[in-house]
């Protein structure tokens, strides 16, 4: 008797599932913009180096890295933007939180955001489409501060040796910087297995990493200053060079490349020069 009842019950569930239609699918794209039409219902939405425009219904979260999100429909979950802004139009509604890193959370008077609104405009992402003024100032101030610390610790002679390493051994600096960054990432990931001690170990890794990058950034700034102002000596023009490099980081898309190359060089040059303890080898032309 039980087996006879199981068949119609199973058929009933199958018919109900077919009547409800297929479950919403997630949508992920890179570089290409995502548009959720007014008649569409999707699950989570992820967009990398592109914008998201929601006109329909998103049952999950919406995440955009290197782009912005425009809501003209309904989002059940949270909205997170890194390197962009969130704009909720008059007919838009977000049931969760709206978080913008490197941008602002904006909404029209009739736009609804049920959760928290969190804007972090000063944490600018190099190369983002719409850099904020506050983020640009914060990035320039941070770069100048790190370079000033490097000059104060290493002094001009050592920074100049790092600058020479960048000038004469640029490819090797890039290669060593790639290896150093890879090792740091691996060690940082492994720290997650240390339990309660993970935070202290991560801090112990982060401090020398930042100091090394700051040393290389000081050498890079001095090298750019020598190229731009060949008749000037000392460190007086280095802040100008650092500001110029910061402005390049603010250029959409190109700024990301500038940041990556600068970081790799800044990591590699201090290592191959012994943090400026030795200068770059000078090749003496062979005599006939």
Image: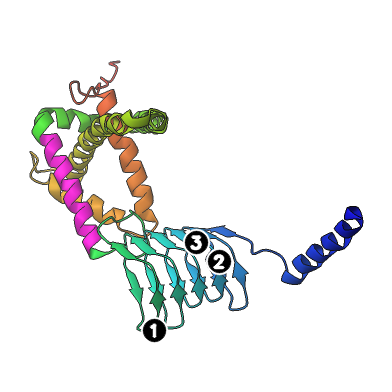
| First-in-chain label (2 vs 1) | 2
In this view of the protein, which residue sits in the foreground, 281 or 80?
80
Residue 78 in view of the camera: yes
In this view, 115 is above or below 158: below
For label 3, the residue is: 61
Secondary structure under the numbered disc 3 in the rendered image? loop
Q: In which image quadrant can residue 285 be found?
A: top left
Q: Quadrant of the C terminus?
A: top left
**Magenta region: which residues?**
134-151
- Tell me, yes or no, whether the highlighted magenta stretch contains residue 265: no
Residue 109 coordinates in the image, percent (x, y): 35, 83
For label 2, the residue is: 59
Secondary structure under the numbered disc 2 in the rendered image? loop
- Tell me, yes or no, whether the highlighted magenta stretch contains residue 146: yes
Label 1 crowd (10 A; few <14 / some 14-19 / many >=20): few
For label 1, the residue is: 110
């Amino acid at each position: 008797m039980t087996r006879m009842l199981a068949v119609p019950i199973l058929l009933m569930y199958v018919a109900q599932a077919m009547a409800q239609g297929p479950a919403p699918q997630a949508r992920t794209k890179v570089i290409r913009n995502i548009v959720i039409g007014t008649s569409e219902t999707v699950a989570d939405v992820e967009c990398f180096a592109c914008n998201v425009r929601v006109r329909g219904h998103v049952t999950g979260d919406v995440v955009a890295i290197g782009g912005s999100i425009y809501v003209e429909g309904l989002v059940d979950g949270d909205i997170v933007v890194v390197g962009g802004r969130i704009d909720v139009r008059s007919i838009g509604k977000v049931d969760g939180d709206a978080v913008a890193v490197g941008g602002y959370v904006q909404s029209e008077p009739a736009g609804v955001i049920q959760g928290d609104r969190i804007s972090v405009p000063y944490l600018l992402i190099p190369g983002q489409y719409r850099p904020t003024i506050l983020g640009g100032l914060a990035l320039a101030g941070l770069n100048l501060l790190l370079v000033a610390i490097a000059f104060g610790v290493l002094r001009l002679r050592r920074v100049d040796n790092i600058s020479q390493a960048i000038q004469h051994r640029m490819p090797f600096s890039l290669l060593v910087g790639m290896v150093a960054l890879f090792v740091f990432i691996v060690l940082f990931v492994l720290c997650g297995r240390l339990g309660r001690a993970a935070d202290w170990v991560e801090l112990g890794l982060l401090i020398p990493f930042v100091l090394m990058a700051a040393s290389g950034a000081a050498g890079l700034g001095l090298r750019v200053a020598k190229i731009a102002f060949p008749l000037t000596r000392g460190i007086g023009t280095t802040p100008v060079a650092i500001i110029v490099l910061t402005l390049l980081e603010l250029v959409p898309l190109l700024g990301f490349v500038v940041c990556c190359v600068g970081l790799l060089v800044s990591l590699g040059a201090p290592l191959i020069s012994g943090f400026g303890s030795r200068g770059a080898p000078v090749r003496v032309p062979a005599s006939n």
